[in-house]
Structure formats: structure tokens, C-alpha cells
Image (cartoon, rainbow, N blue to C red):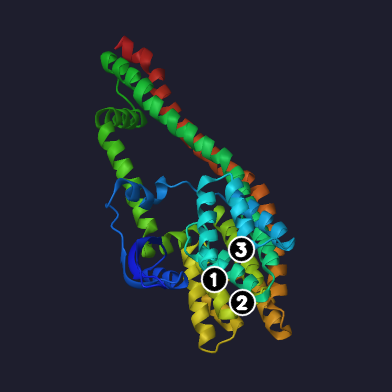
Amino acid sequence: MLFAYRGRDGEGALAEGTLEASSSDAAASELQRRGITPLTVTEKAAGSSSKDLFKDIEWLQAKVSVDDLIVFCRQMYALTKAGIPIIRTIRGLADSARSPRLGEVLDDLADRLESGATLATAMQAHNKVFPDIFVAMIHVGENTGELDKSFKRLAQILELERDTKRRIKQAMRYPTFVIIALSAAMVIINIFVIPQFASTFERLGADLPFLTRVLVFTSNTMMTYWPLMLLLLAGGIYGFRAWSKSPAGRVTWDRYKLKMPVLGPLLHQITLSRFSRNFASTLSAGVPVTQAMTVVANASDNAWVGKHLHEMRNGIERGESLLRTARNSKMFTPLVLQMIGVGEETGGVDEMLVNVADFYDEEVDYGLSRLAESIEPILLLGVAFLVLILALGVFLPIWDLGSAAMG
């Protein structure tokens, strides 16, 4: 969000301008770090100018990809390990960044560092680029003097997430193409093929079978009301997207995704693997358990899982053990619960969770390799069902065409 501010600098002179921050309190804190005493901090209206309007529309902004963040983390790890000053490092990476958006963000980070802000605080102002787990790991690295290790650990986490998403897309490519091809074939048949048969049978006065009448009715409906059907389809897609982005809708949809046939168990394993590895990374970096749970919950891309993680954090704050809160959430498998219990007894929860993440990564690899084989029978049944309906609906009247012509 963009905030307009008025304040006084160290010499008492009036200072005015705009500032990007996550909230008004964060903007006021940033101004104080710059040596400006804020007088007023107000959120700038989205329609104040065309430039600000386009800046506030998220989908019009250039995206910072995961690959760009991985390269940034690897470069920061090498340069900070070599002892190069952090501001000089970020300035240099901003000039050589492949993504213009990332270059702008890095320039802003350098400006904030020069004004006295910490790197974690500066990154927190760009929460659309740097997720919560990113900020938390950098904060720990700055406090422990191991910033280079934090960047290395972040690069490893991002690489695992990128590889998992790529394997999912690769496994879903074939089923997606088949579904698109079937949909296109149904549209073409209903628009061009069935009307020709219907007109022929009508001229001959043939008594059409039930399936043929269904196909003709479907074709006539599509030919007559196709603008309304497109409008309803677009409205349904828009309504679903709006509902799935609402807090309650997102929780419900994310919970349903984990229960979907075929894909649900695989997504559940991916979620458990991501939670285990991220939670282990934050704990091994020295983050307290409650703060680590908050970071992992905010970094989760599944709202239903994030909601239960927040509930687990509340239980830990009340004095309950990690194992008990995890069992009460009812979203972890017995393996995860067993490893958490062993980790609490031995004081090595992070090591146990790394083992859990490795185990689920292997299961995910195997599941992704078998995903196409699991979906193919379902697709074949769907194709066979559609072909059977079309064949019976089209060829049954053809078999009676001779008798209809004689009559």
C-alpha cells in the first residue's frame, strides 16, 4: 500500500512524500528510522492518478518469479559469505537483476538500509515479493550473524517448491490436453454434425430414438442460447474465483482440494512435506516455536492448513505440547505425530521433521510418476462414455434410415 506523509526531519524542516508499507504503523516506524517525525500518515487513494492506479493494481505489475528469488538468494549467499558490504551487494544485484520489478525492489531495500533499517524490516515492506518465511529467516540470520546461511537455506527451500510445482504441472499436462480436446470435439459435433443429421431425419420423417433426441435438443440449445451460455460460464468462473479468494471460501476450497480423488492424497503429502521442511528450517535457525508456527502458517499456500497451524500456535501459547496440538488438529498422519513426539523427547524436533520431509518427498516423487497412470483410466472411461452416447445417438437412426425412406 502507498501512504502519503507529512513530517519534520532532524532539523525541523517540513518533509513530505509517499512511502510504500504494509500498514500505517509500519509506515510511521519507517519514517522514524529515517529520522523523520511523522505528523500525518494517510493511505493514498487508488484513483489519485493514473500512475498510482496502475501501480496499485497487482495483476498489472511485473511479477518476481521463484527463479528470480532463487538466483537472488544464491548470489546473496556467495557475496555475503565473501564479506562484501550488504548495501554494496544489493546495489550491484539491483543493476544486474533480470527482472525489472526485482531491480526496483532491491534499490528500495538499499535505500532503506542506508536510512538505518534492518534488511528484514526493509523486506517486510515488500510482502508481495518476499514471503513471511523469507523475512523470518533473514531476521534470524541478522541477529545470529549467519546471514549467508539464511540465504542458502532459503534458496534450498525455494528450489524444492519450484521443482514440486514443475512436476505437478508436467503430470497434469496430458489430462488437461485430453479434457480440452474432448470439450472442443463436443462443441464441434453439436454445432456442425448433429444439425445436419437432424435436418436429414426430419425430411425423411424418421422416428428418432431417445438418445438422438437428446443430442438434437442439446445441439439446438447450444446453437440458440450460446451467448447466454458463454455469459453464464464467464459469470460462474468469476463468481468461483471471487468466492475462492474470500477468507471463508478459500478455507473451504483448500480443504476440499485435500480430499479430491487421486489428487487429494498427493496434495496432502506435498503440504505435509512443505510444513515439515519449513518448520524444521525455522526451528534450526533459532526461531521460537510459536513464532516459527506463525511464520509457517502465513507461508502456507493452503488456507485450511494455515488456519489449523494458527490454532496449534494458540494451543502452544496456552502451555500445551506440540504433539498434543498437532494431534488435536487432526490433519497430520501418524508418522508425523510419531516423529514430533520423538523429537520433543530428544530435543531434536527439527531433525525429526527433516526426516519426515525427506520421506514425504520420496512419496511425492513416486506419486507424481504414477499420477498420469492413475488418471488415464478415468479419462478412458469418460471418452468411452461420450463415444458410446454419440455413436448410439447418431448411428441408431441411420440403421433405420432405409425403412424410414421406404415409408
Residue shown at 32% from the left, 11% from the top: 405
Name the secondary structure under disc 3.
helix
Q: Closest to the observer: 379 or 1?
A: 1
Q: Closest to the observer: 263 or 326?
A: 326
Whichever of callouts 2 and 3 sits on the residue coming sooner in the sequence is: 3
Whichever of callouts 2 and 1 sits on the residue coming sooner in the sequence is: 2
Residue shown at 54% from the left, 55% from the top: 106
Q: Quadrant of the C terminus?
A: top left
- Residue 366, x across and y down, in percent: 69, 53
Identify the residue under disc 2.
287
The amino acid beneath tag 1 is: Val
- Circles 2 and 1, Cβ within 8 Å, touching? The answer is yes
Q: Closest to the observer: 347 or 59?
A: 59
Q: Which disc, if any, is residue 274? A: 3
Residue shown at 27% from the left, 52% from the top: 48
- Tell whether 23 sits left or right of 112: left
- Tell whether 324 sits left or right of 342: left
- Tell whether 295 sits left or right of 404: right
- Residue 255, x across and y down, in percent: 47, 63
Calculate the distance from the C-alpha at mark 2 to the C-alpha at mark 1: 10 Å
Q: Residue furthest bottom?
A: 319
Calculate the distance from the C-alpha at mark 2 to the C-alpha at mark 3: 17 Å
Name the secondary structure under disc 1.
helix
Neighbourhood count class around disc 1 (C-alpha, 10 Å): few under 14, some 14–19, many 20 upward: many
The amino acid beneath tag 3 is: Arg
Q: Can residue 372 be seen in this view?
A: yes
Identify the residue under disc 1.
295
